[in-house]
């Protein structure tokens, strides 16, 4: 596995998102043993950036990751997130990046992960009630205390990134980035490169859509998060299958799978970008990791660059408003 630098943090250039092992997607939480095997297999293949968050579950995903990496802590770059759980009583899905909440959150994450330090600690969503300078100040204190190694932001806009970076170096910004979600990552890239900040691309396979494995919404459980998003709505879902067809055509030409092509396209966008495809299956992590060896031709990159834009926003209006972008 080739390696890259995320704002000075050395990692393999493909990571692993653990969210779907515990929450949000069809089948989440149904097979913990397979999920643990998947994380361990990823480590065996050279993947070291494992991404989780306290809100996933809530809390159970961090516990799962902690169980999976036990005994292999030095092989792992653990990334987790705070700010979508208010520990003052309001609970999950409440924005809270106040200094007191950050300190409560980090102690819980350390305990659940079974570790004495978090390698990359993200603010999950920007909290409009707390100036970013206050949040970054407490994060800088946690770095000084050795509880956090590097600091990141998730779904933050340019102004927030600049202000945060002025208080303490931001190592990575995480946002959705894929063949069908080029906004907001691409407009942010010049700023991130100016400041020496890496980009972590979540949902690099379009929430599974770009793999070609999803052809009907009937495959989803009723509570699958994707059913709340406009791109998976009736009409848009069917129109967006055109994109999958185009990716499959390039994959056939490249002698790779659609998932590998989607990841290889991201890797070709720069050596400061790390996709974190999510899966809970060993076979899928083996497939995704093999994208490290896929090199697309200039002609294939042009074809992918000209893909039909997706129908529908990537989030509901409520969730999009919370991205800070």
Image (tube, rainbow, N blue to C red):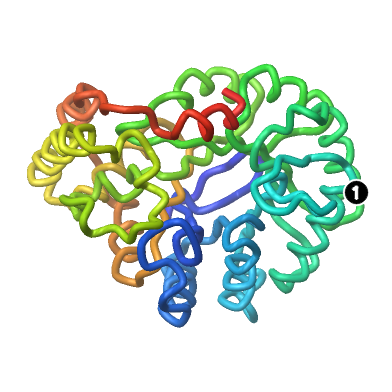
Q: Which of 262 and 325 lies nearest the eye of the viewer?
A: 325
Q: Is residue 12 above or below residue 171?
A: below
Q: Is residue 207 above or below residue 268?
A: below
Q: Residues within 10 Å of mark 1 (few under 14, many from 20)?
A: few
Q: Quadrant of residue 288?
A: bottom left
User: Could you tell me which residue is drawn at 31 percent across and 64 percent down?
Assistant: 284
Q: Which of 271 and 146 lies nearest the eye of the viewer?
A: 146
Question: Quick check: 305 left or right of 159?
Answer: left
Q: Is residue 150 above or below residue 185?
A: below
Give residue 227's position: percent from left, percent from top: 35, 46
Question: Quick check: 20 left or right of 296?
Answer: right
The quadrant in which the N terminus is found is bottom left
Give residue 8's position: percent from left, percent from top: 66, 41
User: Could you tell me which residue is drawn at 77 percent across and 41 percent down?
Assistant: 96
Q: Which of 307 and 236 lies nearest the eye of the viewer?
A: 236
Give residue 123's position: percent from left, percent from top: 70, 41
The quadrant in which the C terminus is found is top right
Give residue 125's position: percent from left, percent from top: 65, 37
Q: Which residue is mark 1?
A: 144
User: Could you tell me which residue is drawn at 33 percent across and 61 percent down?
Assistant: 221
Question: Quick check: 96 left or right of 243?
Answer: right
């Amino acid at each position: 596995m080739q390696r890259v630098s995320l704002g000075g943090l050395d990692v393999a250039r493909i990571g692993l998102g653990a969210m779907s092992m515990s929450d949000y997607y069809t089948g989440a939480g149904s097979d913990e043993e397979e999920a643990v095997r998947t994380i361990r297999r990823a480590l065996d293949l050279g993947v070291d950036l494992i991404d989780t968050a306290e809100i996933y579950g809530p809390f159970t995903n961090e516990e799962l990751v902690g169980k999976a990496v036990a005994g292999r802590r030095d092989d792992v770059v653990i990334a987790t997130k705070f700010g979508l759980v208010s520990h003052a009583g309001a609970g999950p899905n409440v924005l809270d990046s106040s200094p007191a909440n950050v300190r409560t959150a980090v102690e819980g994450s350390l305990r659940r992960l079974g570790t004495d330090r978090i390698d990359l600690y993200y603010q999950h969503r920007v909290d409009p009630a707390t100036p970013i300078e206050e949040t970054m100040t407490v994060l800088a204190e946690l770095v000084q205390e050795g509880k956090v190694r590097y600091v990141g932001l998730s779904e933050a806009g340019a102004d927030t990134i600049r202000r945060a970076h002025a208080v303490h170096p931001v190592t990575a910004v995480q946002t959705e980035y894929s063949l069908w979600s080029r906004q907001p990552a691409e407009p942010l890239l010049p700023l991130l490169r100016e400041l020496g900040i890496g980009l972590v691309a979540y949902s690099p396979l379009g929430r599974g859509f770009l793999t070609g494995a999803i052809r009907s919404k009937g495959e989803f459980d009723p509570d699958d998060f994707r059913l709340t998003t406009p791109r998976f709505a009736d009409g848009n879902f069917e129109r967006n299958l055109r994109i999958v067809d185009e990716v499959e055509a390039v994959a056939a030409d490249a002698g790779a799978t659609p998932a590998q092509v989607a990841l290889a396209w991201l890797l070709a966008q720069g050596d400061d970008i790390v996709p974190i495809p999510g899966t809970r299956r060993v076979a899928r992590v083996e497939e995704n990791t093999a994208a490290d060896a896929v090199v697309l031709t200039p002609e294939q990159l042009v074809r992918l660059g000209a893909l039909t834009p997706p129908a529908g926003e990537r989030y509901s209006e409520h969730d999009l408003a919370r991205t800070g972008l």
